[in-house]
Image: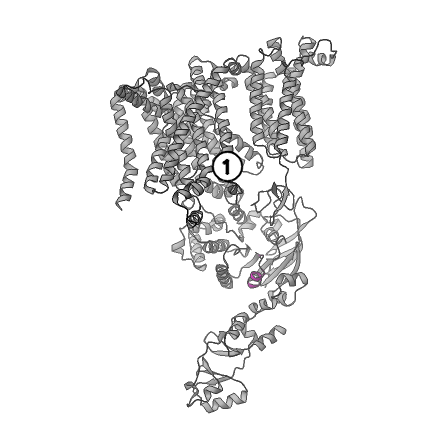
Amino acid sequence: MPTTIISSLLKRFLPLAITVAVVVWLYHHYGALTYTIENTKEFMRFVAEHIFLVVVSLAASVIVGVSLGTIMTRKGFEKTGPAIMALVNIWQSVPSLGVIALAYGFLPLLGLSGIGVLPALIALFFHAVAPIVRNTYAGIEAVSADVIESATGMGMTERQILMRIELPNALPVIMGGVRTSSAIIVGTAPLAFLIGGGGLGFLIFTGIALMDMGILISGAVPVALIAMIFDNLFGKLEKIVVSKGIQAEEYQTA
Amino acid sequence: MEIAVCPSCQKEIPETTKFCSHCQAPILSVARKAISVWPWRDKIILFATLLVAIAFFQPWVPGSVLNEDVPLSAFRMLMSIGDLDIDFLESYNILRMALMVPLLIFLLFLLTYLRRSFQESIFLPLFLLIIVLSAFVPALVAWLGKLWGIAFGVILAVGIFAYFKNVMRTGRLGPTSHFILTLFLCFAIFLYQMDLAQSVYLKFETLHFTDTFGYWFTWLVITLLLVIIALSSLKRVEDFWLLVSAVILSLVGYRTFINPLFLSGPFAFFADNFSTVGEYTMTHIQMVAIAQVIAISTAVPIGIYITRNPTAANIVLYLTSIVITIPSIALFGFMMPILSTIDRHWDAVSGIGIGQVPAIIALALYSQLPIIRNTYIAIKNVDPSTIEAGRGMGMTRFQLLIQLQLPLAAPIIMAGVRTAVIMSIAIAAIAAYIGAGGLGLFVSEGLQMATNDSVIAGAISMSILAILADIVLQKAEDWLTPTGLKIVR
Amino acid sequence: MSVMLSFQEVTKIYPGAEHFKAVDSLTFDLNEGEICTLVGPSGCGKTTAMKMINRLISMTSGKILVDGQNADRMDTIELRRSIGYVIQNIGLFPNMTIAENIAIVPRLKGWDAGKISEKVESLLEMVNLPAEEFMNRYPKELSGGQQQRIGVARGMAADPPIMLMDEPFGAIDPINREHLQNEFLRIQEKVRKTIVFVTHDIDEAIKMGDKICLLRNGKLVQFDNPEKLLTEPANDFVRDFVGGDRTLKRLNLLKVKNAMQTDPPLIRALESLQTAKGKLSELKTDHLIVVDENGRLLGTVDPAALGKTGDKVAEVVQATQAHIQASASLKDGLSEIFSHDLGFVIAVDDAQKVVGTLTEKDIKALLRK
């Protein structure tokens, strides 16, 4: 008994305590707190920009990714589906800085600007859409043929099968993809600053450039916190939206 | 090698299916048919053909330049379509450059066509899509009103139309439709290349090795890369189209994106900074490799340990999953002040706060989760009856680990390492901003000085590195899988 | 009884296999409330034939009449919703609770919530799974046998007059299968659905079917009731398929009451030993069956027992285990005969009243008829 209590205490509070301690020490030691308070207005703007980048690009990639992944499983795409997935897999290994740089370099060729919020959003979107497409496709493909057959035999229309059977059953896998995507976007969003996308990346890169640890910490800590909050949020969301009959084990292979 | 075949329509089906995916017939017993895999010998022949063809057509090989006194007025006539006043030798060289790729594709086509008639190919629709989207549309927009553009568009349209008509008539993608498509495609690409070759030729006046190095080098690199990708995933003759689409893709990509850039662009940049590219790549690989050695030597033992201690497992997996959520640039941010404090306190070698030390530490930290988690799961998932059998035969715990659990878990651990490596390559690129060097430098310097070439060169080189690492490690994974596990089901 | 389901010259040719008719002009009628088992070797077209009823597979030519209506003219979705469908691998929807799984067709049909939950509860009761315990559980928490019961309940949820069952008990272990078969027959007694039941197991077909439709290479070989199929196989194929032990299989089908002698040598327990001795020599048998005032079985007496001192038969009666329900199968009857050395078993009814005796000879006589 005591061991379980200790372990749950350790699991719940130790990381939190360590995090708080490290953050407090960093803020205190390098004067990040002073910097943040002195520049509250700017700081809030950076946070807002950052969250805007994350939310908009994530929403776009969820909408596009789920639809594309679903379409690839429909009739008539039996051959195109696997081919697109092969490309998606290759695309997924492109580094995040590479994606940002590609947006900067290639968007001008299409007559768009390579600098600003739009290219940043486009880059984040393209970087994050791959896991969602892949997981949606894989999730729907993995729904057992027996289940589909009995649904058809019971007189469900194709649309009903998709909405009530295929998507709900693929949801744990899709949510896994969304969670990966959110991690990718949150991790890449600071780099958006490099192509003029704004956000908390400004503080981090400025801090590095000036070797001013106060500025650096006042950017890095909120970025890490936002990442943890998003990860937690999606973990909770997964528990809520996924039917209890198909919730996955806690740890699975990548 | 054998594949499962639907007994009623004779097409290939997955072995476990209950209904044929082609004719919907219920599958009661699976027929089996031997398929001809494309043997490595043939792949090598193809590859060699490709190299020889490139060598023959490229302009700097001695003896491949034509003498002036050969009367070939047909070339001249063809050249005059382009409204250009150039002499015969030039026109020959242009034509030769333009002919190179279509001939190559045709050659490859014949080679496979002679071996065996084509069946359906998965990549054909995709391939067409790529052609139409990435070549046809921008090309028409760019060349609107130009003779080449119109000719290209018309021929492509006729080809695609003829192709689909044939498909619709016969109801399947037969050899004839492939043949028609190939012919039209080759001709279209020829016209397409003509334009490219002219622009190259006019730019450089005389075709010497050094002048056109950027052009040939980059073309060669991209094509070879794609061919390697294609060959490595090529299992059957039918997937010939994958190879062709790879070549086409490289060309289309070249014409649409790279050619406009190479004269002043990133590939000229590559050619100009050949040694720097190599140096940065080496730094990049070095960082990732050191971090991986550290990560594997810590994470695998930890992963093995926590399979025996559930409390530790919970804590370790939780902590590593927290670490991995922290964005890399933020982690660098934390590490810089901490490391430089250590630096000051111990009066150590100045500046471990920036540079490769924090980068490698961060990479090793990030790599923990995928490797620990996969090790943990892989060892947990080893069939308990296997372990019991081993124990029953008198194996010690260490022997069990070395002889049973680890070999069975190896492919999954390797998958974890692959994830870790891909991630590390991406993060090492960002580490350029804290002075660690590597391919990220091209991007950071390029963005700072607003030089597009450098930025794109950096993006492309790091992507190629990541993709290659992915392919190589996937092969390693296959290789590590015990033969007994490869037969799925 | 009216004809519920009618196959008329139904033919199926799969595209790409023009030379082979998967189902070849299949014609038969099925009455309301009957179970028809489609049986035959692998690839005989039985599953195809069944799936053409709810048009999961389209037919090439011919007609299927469902309750007098041409199935081909009906709206596919409506048709499927009015036919229950149970498959071998059950195909429960893992994301839904048991109650939601059962309620799916009623909900598609737009029943109101109260009616649906009532129906779900009564169906769960019917398949012997307590509603309050199982309603809110998920399929993965149930055993294979329980899942299959839910599958059957789901198939019946919207009260379809017709049900299609594709080897519903195929994936279940033999003991549970037997149990589920009996349970299913019990349910069918009550609900009287018209059922098309696909199986490759001839024993199951004989046990479950009111009619058996034996197919081979898409052609109908014999359409008969089980008894006829066993006694009068149409050709050698049927004979082989039914098996060399088809006489033994008939034993499964026939009941003790069909074969037994209905005039057992009875003696009341309160009668004297003298009377018993007289009856024994009169009837020329070795044993007399002793019954009480109500005709219930008490035991037997033989000459040796009658030689003992005593007054009433009740004092010398020997208890016996050699009795069997008259409604049991002949197979069980035969087994009882062999396991006791009386040479016969006593047939009793539900109230333990003796109604007859069964000997090997009686069974032989019946089988030879």
- Which structural element holds mark 1? helix
Mark 1 surroundings within 10 Å by alpha-carbon count, few (fewer than 14), some (14 through 19), many (20 or more): many
Magenta portion: prevailing SS class: helix
Residue beneath the point at 28% across and 27% down: A23
Q: Is residue B167 above or below residue C220?
A: above
Relative horizontal placement of residue A20, taking residue C3 as reference (left or right): left
**Percent of width and height locating residue A199:** 37, 22
Q: Is residue C206 rendered magenta in the image? A: yes
Residue beneath the point at 64% across and 31% down: B42
Residue beneath the point at 48% across and 32% down: A65
Relative horizontal placement of residue B420, taking residue C212 as reference (left or right): left
Residue beneath the point at 45% across and 59% down: C126
Front position in the image: A143 or B339: B339
Image quadrant in which the C terminus of chain C is located: bottom right
Q: What chain is tagged by disc 1?
A: A
Image quadrant in which the N terminus of chain C is located: bottom right
> Can the viewer see residue C184 in this picture?
yes
Residue on which disc 1 sits: A137
**Percent of width and height locating residue C323:** 48, 76
The residue range painted magenta reads C199-207
**Percent of width and height locating residue B285:** 45, 24
**Percent of width and height locating residue B116:** 68, 34
Name the amino acid, label 1. Answer: Tyr
